[in-house]
Amino acid sequence: MIVVTNPFSVENETNMIQSLFAEGLSLLHIRKPDFSELEMAQFIHQIKLEFRDRIVLHNHHALAEDFGINRFHFSEKERKQTHDSPERFSKPCRYSTSTHSIKDFNLLDSDFDYAFLSPVFKSISKENYHPETDLFEEIKSRTNYKTKVIALGGIDSHNIQKVLQNGFDDIALLGSIWKNENPLKQFTLCQQIALSYLQSQV
C-alpha cells in the first residue's frame, strides 16, 4: 500500500509519516510541488534513516543521493517530455509515473515498476476532480503486465475491496488519510482490508 503526502503542510506531518512507516507502510510518495529544494531537504531530514529507502521523490530528484533515496516518480507531463523513458541515474533506481487512461498505461516503457491510474473515484483531496471515464471498464483492456497498476483517487476503506477485485494491483491513499481526524487509524483499517482481500486470493 502506498500513501501520497498532502501537497500542503499538515500539522505534525513527519511524525505521522514515521508512525505510518512503523505500522507497515510500504512506500511514501513525497509530493510537495511548492517546496523549494531547501524545504524538501529539511522535510526529508526529519524522517528517520531507517525509513528513507521507502521514500519516493516527485521533485528535487537531485537530493536523492544525499538522503539514500533511489525511488523517483514522474508526472505524466514529465514522462512525455523525456520521451516516455525516465532520466538516468548513476546507481540502480526504481521508477514510477502517473497515467490517466489505460491506453497511456499500456504504452509505458518497462522501466517503470508501477504507475498510478487515476482518478478511479471522485477525489477526496481535490475539488471537482472526478473520473471522466469508467476506469473499471478501461482496465479490462490492459495489455501491460510488466508494470503494476495502482489505483489512485477517492480510495478509502469503503471501496478498497472493489478496486482490488477489478484488476488493480494495489492502491494509493491520499485524501482518505490526510483529510481524516485520525490518519493512523484510517491507514491501519485500509491496510487490514487490503491484506485480508489479498490473502483470500492466495
Image: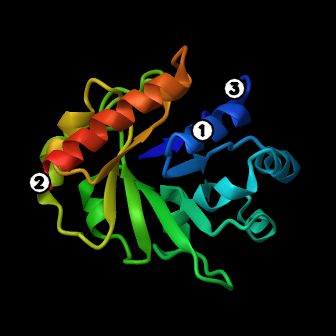
Question: Which of disc 3 and disc 2 is earlier in sequence?
Answer: 3
| Residue at screen point 30% across, 31% down | 121
Question: Which of disc 2 and disc 1 is earlier in sequence?
Answer: 1
Amino acid type of the residue that numbered disc 2 sits on in the rendered structure: Lys
Amino acid type of the residue that numbered disc 3 sits on in the rendered structure: Val
Q: How is the image coloured?
A: rainbow
Q: Nearer the viewer, residue 92 or 118?
A: 92
Instruction: Say above or below: 199 vs 90.
Output: above
| Camera sees residue 182 | yes
Q: Nearer the viewer, residue 51 or 13?
A: 51
Q: In the rendered image, which quarter is residue 160 located in?
A: top left
Q: Horizontal and vertical percent for residue 96?
A: 48, 63
| Residue at screen point 59% across, 65% down | 71
Q: What is the count of numbered marks? A: 3
Question: Which mark identifies residue 5?
Answer: 1
Q: How far apart are labels 2 and 3 at the CA level?
A: 37 Å
Element carrying mark 3: loop
Q: Horizontal and vertical percent for residue 115?
A: 39, 58
Q: Single out the mark in the foreground, 1 or 2.
A: 1
Question: Which mark identifies residue 10?
Answer: 3
Residue furthest bottom in the image: 90
Residue that label 2 marks: 140
